[in-house]
Image (cartoon, grey):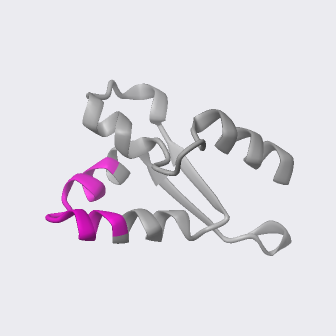
Amino acid sequence: MLAGHSALFITASDLLLDLNGQDTSRALERRLRAYARPQILAIDEIGYLSYDAHAADLLVSKRPGVGPEQLFLTWQNNV
């Protein structure tokens, strides 16, 4: 990746299929950590799907005070 940044590119449907396939909350946390590991996580086709509440929760950061706006600003400031 440019400038030595790690990155992961995935479609929203593949991401949600993977996360919804986790059997336990511990397994889900492990997968969420794996997706948080790269410095850049690019989720493609996110605007093509409609999401139920559970899927929307999976797409938004679980850390208090960090939501999509902050994640975008972080990305924007690091590019």
Among the 4 quarters of the image, the one containing residue 26: bottom left
Q: Residue furthest bottom?
A: 4
Q: Position of residue 28 (x, y in %)?
A: 29, 63
Q: Residue at x 47, y 36 (%)?
A: 45
Q: Residue at x 23, y 62 (%)?
A: 25
Among the 4 quarters of the image, the one containing residue 59: top left
38 or 2: nearer the viewer: 38
Q: Is residue 73 magenta?
A: no
Where 37 falls versus 54 (above or below)?
A: below
In screen coordinates, is 27 left or right of 69?
left
Where 48 falls versus 3 (above or below)?
A: above
In screen coordinates, is 43 left or right of 56?
right
65 or 38: nearer the viewer: 65
Q: Residue at x 52, y 51 (%)?
A: 63
Question: Which residue range is magenta in the image?
Answer: 16-29
63 or 12: nearer the viewer: 63
Q: In this view of the protein, can residue 30 be seen by the observer?
A: yes
